Image (spheres, grey):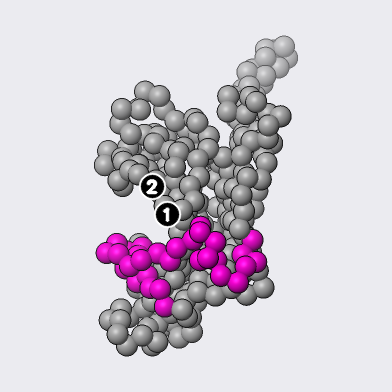
Amino acid sequence: MKPLHRLLCCLLALPLASCATKQSRPEVEPKPHRWALAWSDEFDREDIFATGVWTKIPRGHSDWNNTMSPHESLYDLQQGKLILRGRRNDVNVADSAEYLTGGVYTKGKKSFDLGRIEIRCKLQGAKGAWPAIWMLPNNAPWPKGGEIDIMERLNFDSFAYQTVHSYYTVKLGQKTNPKYYTTAPIDPEGYNTYAVEVLPNELRFFINDRFSFAYPRLPEKEADGQFPFGKDYYLLIDMQLGGKWVGKVEGLREPIEMHIDWVRYYTPEAKAPSFWE
């Protein structure tokens, strides 16, 4: 009886041990690459719009740009920080918008291809605040050309969204094969660094150098526009207020600010020829 008893115990323990091994297995993070700084803006000039890189985002009809304004009160440079503001419109009686917001982009001036782009910034919270850092293609319509959302934060959230959009996710509704977004924690009161690595076969997202998630290319879905990323994108940084996703603005008495410390763009070091493999 004792040998049989021991055998039964061992057999019963096997599934439990297997489950314990799977549960304790850490998520695999991408291997670190060797990067070389190719371009940066530290915002240490008196006028960023004289650099030939940045333009104020004009007003449009979408949720993300329907309050954009060139009003000078929405833009500032202080101690090496670019400050973008969103505010109640009590400064421009000629503008019928209830709120005014500031945003900048590199459209038609500075493009980004394969590589890593990082932005360090601090966000103030408010009901209806929707600051964003993202990328769009210079020469392709939305959503066919894709969209890379490096950071979006809503209201007072202590986390940020990082999202991928394309014809595949928007028009075909393919949002789980592969997963098209994630959320990751941030310091809601301090500076955080948001980054994306654009590789030939994958997008890799990070917050404060911590890997968030990866969006891979699926060769079998190429005809469905699943992965249009990797060439000739421009960068947008904007302090939007209100919208269908974030909701209505409430209780905003003082301007809300987005402080951008720097923007940096990296390409692989010359000593890493197998980088893109």
Residue closest to the eye, 125 or 271: 271
Real-space Cα separation, disc 1 to disc 2, in angstroms: 7 Å
Q: Is residue 7 left or right of residue 92?
A: right
Q: In this view, does 206 lie above or below 252?
A: above
Quadrant in which residue 191 is drawn: bottom right
Q: Is residue 70 magenta?
A: yes
Q: Circle 2: is it few (<14), some (14-19), or many (20+) Cα within 10 Å?
A: some
Disc 1 designates what residue?
Answer: 107
In the image, 231 versus 34, the foreground residue is 231
Q: Name the residue under label 2.
A: 138
Q: Is the magenta stretch mostly helix, strand or loop?
A: loop
Residue at position x 61%, y 65% in the image: 43
Whole-percent x and y of residue 138? 38, 47
Classify 88 as above or below 23: below
Q: In which quarter of the image is the C terminus?
A: top right
Q: Read off the magenta span.
A: 42-71
Place of residue 46 in the rendered image (x, y in percent of width and height, measured from the top left): 60, 72
Report the number of discs. 2
> Residue 111, how many percent across, how many down?
48, 47
The answer to whether residue 32 is visible is no
Numbered disc 2: secondary structure? loop
Which of these two is toward me, 185 or 216?
A: 216
Return the mark for residue 30. none
Q: Which of 237 and 53 is in front in this view?
A: 53
Secondary structure at numbered mark 1: loop
At label 2, which amino acid type do we have? Asn
Instruction: Determine contact: label 1, label 2, CB under 8 Å.
Output: yes
Task: Tell me which residue sits at (68%, 29%) in the image.
Answer: 272
Relative to 166, 123 lies left or right: right
The residue at 55%/52% (across/down) is 184
| Amino acid on which the number 1 mark rests in the picture | Lys
